[in-house]
Every structure is written in structure tokens, then in C-alpha cells.
Image (cartoon, grey):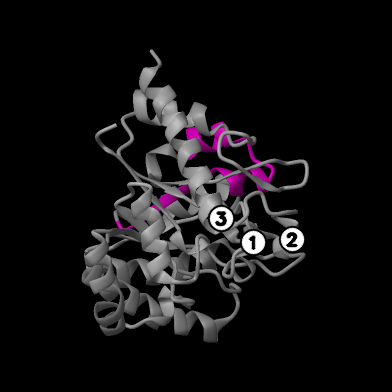
Amino acid sequence: MEHILISGFADEISPDFDEQLRVVTSLGMEYISLRTADGKGIADYTAEEVEEKLLPRLREANVKVSSLGSPIGKINVDDEEAFEKQLVQMEELCKICKVLDCKYIRMFSFFIPEGKNADDYKEIVIEKLKKFDAIAAKYNVVMIHENEKAIYGDIKERCKIILDALGSPHFKSVFDFANFVQCGEDTMECWELLRDHVAYIHIKDAVTTDKENVLCGTGEGKIAEILKRAIKEEGYQGFLTLEPHLVLFDALQSLETENAENIIKENKAKDGAEGYSMQYHALIDILDSIEKSN
């Protein structure tokens, strides 16, 4: 499929950046989504550090960066100190995008206080997202909002609210199948509502029985069905980014709002490299079946 590019969060393989690059190139992949490298989050790097420490290794491996997997917006909506810090981080992430010739920065729409009605926070969420959007516009970078559990935009209707409210070419949507499943959403209904805003797709699957992540195509995300529709009928072009969550890996605990054990009950592969390879080959099988279908 000429206009479909496979990427992935390679830190699920190993915290070691060289090992990440070795595994993805062994699979024939030419892109990664850069979330952590050498055990350090991408938002904690400076553009100069990326240019000095990471870019030469990417070039040597002939690997490009599809997106930055940042934690922007993954803070409490009422934490003003954290928000001000993230405005500074957003500036630096945009500079890192320029160093890496990368277009996208993954981000979120703020955790809502426990027990509070998320709808009551709509205006403040939109106001804060517009400040991030202004920075992205300054650097001609595209923020891609991920539908994460417990944030304002965790369900399809609120995702649509913020996407419509910003109405910006610099603020688009990530479509994450597993996160919608874990929020009790029907992924096909989510796709129908959000497809015009989707600029990036995460390949991650889950089941509702215990909200556990599973190999793509084996859960309730309707991945094969939606990808067939998106690619063959609607002309989706762009990245499909692997985010297996099939083993416990170093960064997972800090990425989830619950204990990692509540997301992955047991390792489904002996290590990150095997889990990553499993997810890659499962996606290739799905794409092959789509290509052969009428």
C-alpha cells in the first residue's frame, strides 16, 4: 500500500535507543515514533541534545521519525504550574521536530479531577489547547490529540468538541482503537464521528472484559474492519503506528493512569522485541488481507 507508512513506539522494545533501532530495521521499518530514548523522555531533551545524541544514530540506521510521543496535555487541568512548564516544553518539542524533519507531536487534553463532570471543564480545556495550538502554528507543526483514558477527550463526543472548537490545521486527531475500547466506546461509531479529523492512527487493541491490551486484530477494536474502510474506501494516507503494550516495559507505568498490571495482566511475549515483532506481523497480515479484498 503505497501511501501507508508503518511506524511504532520503539521504546516498548528496550530503553536502549540503539536496540530500538536495531529491532525496527530488522523488521524492515523505516520510521519510529520517538517517545523515549536511552531511558529519557523526548520532552526532557533539548533540540541541541537531539541533534547531537540521537540524530546521528537515526541517520546511521536510516530511520526517520514519524511523530514525537510527548506527554503534552497529560497533566491535571487545574495544575497551572505544570501547564506553564508544558508551554515551554511545547516550544522545545517544536524545535526538535525541525531537527528531525518530523511533522507531528502527540498530545492529550488534560486529566479531569476525580469525581468531577468533564463537561464542566470544556471552556478551560479549549482555552489551554489553543495556547498549545498557537505554538504549533508558529513552527508549522501538527499536534495530534490522543483519546486517552481519564482526560477530557477520552470519549468520541468530547474529542469532536475540541477538534471542532479549535478548527485548526495544526490540531488533528490520533485514532487509538484500544483507548476507545477501554473507555467503553464502539470504535466504528468513533471512526464515523471523527474520521474527518484523523491524521494519524495507533495500532493497539484491547478487550472490554478486563480492559486488557491484546494483539492487534484479536480484540474489540475492529481494527481490520476500520482500516479496510479507511484505506480502501476513504483514501486514508499516512502512518499506522505500532503501540503493542503486549509486555510490561519501563515507560508504561508512567504512561498509564492505572497500575500497569491492570492493563497487561501478564506478559504475552518474552520481551519487548518479541511483542513488537508480533504486533508488526499481525498488522502486516491485516494489511495483506485488505489489499486482497474486493
Name the quadrant containing residue 185.
top right
The count of marks equals 3
Q: Is residue 166 left or right of residue 140?
A: right
Identity, as a three-letter code, of the amino acid under mark 2: Glu
Which of the two discs, 1 and 2, sits closer to the camera?
1
Give the CA separation, mark 3 to mark 2: 24 Å
Residue at x 77% of width, y 64% of height: 115
Residue at x 33% of width, y 35% of height: 236
Q: Is residue 130 among what the camera can see?
A: no
Tag 3 residue? 153
Q: Is residue 202 left or right of residue 117?
A: left
Q: Position of residue 223 (x, y in %)?
A: 52, 34
Q: Position of residue 19 (x, y in %)?
A: 42, 65
Secondary structure at badge 1 equals: loop
Q: Circles 1 and 2: CB distance less than 8 Å?
A: yes
Magenta range is 170-194
Tag 1 residue? 248
Q: Position of residue 28 (x, y in %)?
A: 33, 47
How many residues crowd around disc 1 within 10 Å: few (fewer than 14), some, or many (20 or more)? many
Tag 2 residue? 261
Which of the two discs, 3 and 2, sits closer to the camera?
2
